[in-house]
Image: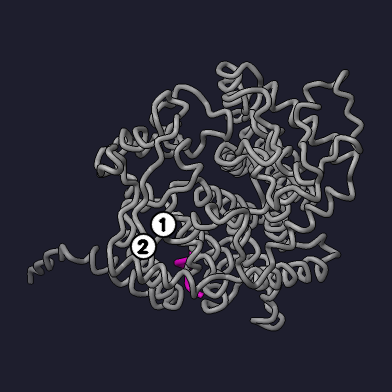
Amino acid sequence: MVTVAEPPRLDAPSAIWRARLWAFVRRHHIFVAALAAAFALRVVTMLGYGPALWFNDSYEYVSGAVNPERPSALRPNGYSFWLLLLRPFHSFGLVAFTQHLMGLGIAVLVYALLRKKFGLPGWGATLATVPVLFDGYQIQLEHLVMSDTMFMLLVVGVVTLVLWHRKVSWRLGAMIGLLLALTALTRSIGLPILALVVVYMLVKRTGWKPITAMVTACAIPVLGYMAWFASAHGNFAMTNSDGAILYMRTALFADCGKMKIDPREELDLALLCINKPPDQRSFSGQNYLWFTNGGQRFHAFGTGSTFTSKVNKSAGDFAKRAILSQPGDYLARVGLDFVRVFRWDRPRFPDYATFLQYEFPFEAKVLPSWSSPSRSTTDRDAQSYDPSLPTEEINGLQRVIGTEIHKPWAGFIKGYQQIVRLPGLVLGVLLLIGLAGVVARWRRLGGPVLLPWLAAFGLLLAPAATAEFDYRYVLPAVPLACLAAAISLRHGFRVGFRPSAKAASAPTIASAE
């Protein structure tokens, strides 16, 4: 008898793929449902506010992408490099879409880490991602042409890589170092994250090879950027703004009498003294950095000299003198701004105009025609990047429209933002839970809770210590605080549970429970 083989079924691979996908969805159905709902909210945002939203800092980022030959004196160009990478598509809508994907990616990293490394049940790991997935201000931040969402993804990615692996090889250390370099080039506060990770790896006795590989892989791109900066601005640094920003921090209390500044000996510092006594100054230090009124003296060196290396050094020296001469006043200001993070309400700060830039707007955004570093104007730079931006005649001038409002989508997501947000008090509770987890693991120096908790705490404290409170500085700490709290509570989810070696080494979230 001759047996004829049955011809192979061409649809077998696709059937296997569908079966695996369905099995994955069933295993993680709670998170998949939450992720789908969060994606829908972001689609509504894009339909309501096209192509993107704008903040005052957005224009310099765009100018850096339109004219990438020269680094910015004010902030690192990492985000401008990302815009440059997307520039061939000429679409701010695509920029916003990628940032919404980044926001969802942050939630995926948090969920995967808690499920497979720390053994939380699906509902517990999903609960830790809710603030990132559904906070209305998080969604609004993702829609801004700003670096914050990219920075958040990079920081959470670094923490995930470090916590995922029990043993860190030198190759993994190098990968973490590259991510840290990208973090630092996106926002300069990323460099202290490197120090934090180094300390954590030393505490965990990781070994000198992965730590050396990490530091080297981080240092090479950062030093290369600093060399590029030096070729353009004359000084080996990442920015010419760190001293100026610290000056802003001290502007509300600095008293040149207490600082004992002699104008005959220290004219460059004396020129930065503010005329008004501290008790008559504005409630926000930003008024003494960005504007030229109210007794502000930062622009005493002349227009266009704000962020030069010389002025930045003088401002930094002035600020350090103020801190050393008036440590109590400095600590009081830092404490006041740090406490602002944990308020239940959301008062207007630092001023109404800035506060409104974190709200979904009622009307279309007309881009300002400020002068830009490219010797053009900010609105023309934006239109050069995305020629599809419409223009409209306003007061006899052609103005570029950066954001258009589309009903009913805009009305829905704006109303949603007013209702669904993470109050600062809840963030404070999450930090306290994480701190309790660190203390409970004191014999292991905080265990795996230590890294995300310190990162969250540091990201909240750093702006208060070096700049000033701002609502957008709070959001990057949220997923890290959720991670620390969830890891701290994991024994509450499963009494006596210890992650198995298999779970600890599982490479993906698709593995069976």
Q: Residue at x 91, y 38 (%)?
A: 258
* 158 vs 424, nearest the viewer: 424
Cα distance, mark 2 to mark 1?
10 Å
Name above or below for residue 402 compared with residue 450.
above
Q: Residue at x 73, y 43 (%)?
A: 195
Provide the residue designation for mark 1. 100
* 88 vs 307, nearest the viewer: 307
Whether residue 206 is visible, yes or no, is no
Q: Earlier in the sequence, mark 2 or mark 1?
A: 2
* 235 vs 498, nearest the viewer: 235
State the colouring used for the structure image. Answer: one colour
Q: Position of residue 462 (x, y in %)?
A: 72, 49
Question: Label 1 is placed on what type of residue?
Answer: His
Specify start and end residues of the magenta stretch as a single range: 509-513
Cβ atoms at labels 2 and 1 below 8 Å apart: yes
Question: Local crowd at mark 1 within 10 Å, few (<14), some, or many (≥20)?
Answer: many
Whether residue 54 is visible, yes or no, is yes
**Residue 510 is inside the magenta segment:** yes
Q: Position of residue 437 (x, y in %)?
A: 76, 70
Provide the residue designation for mark 2. 45
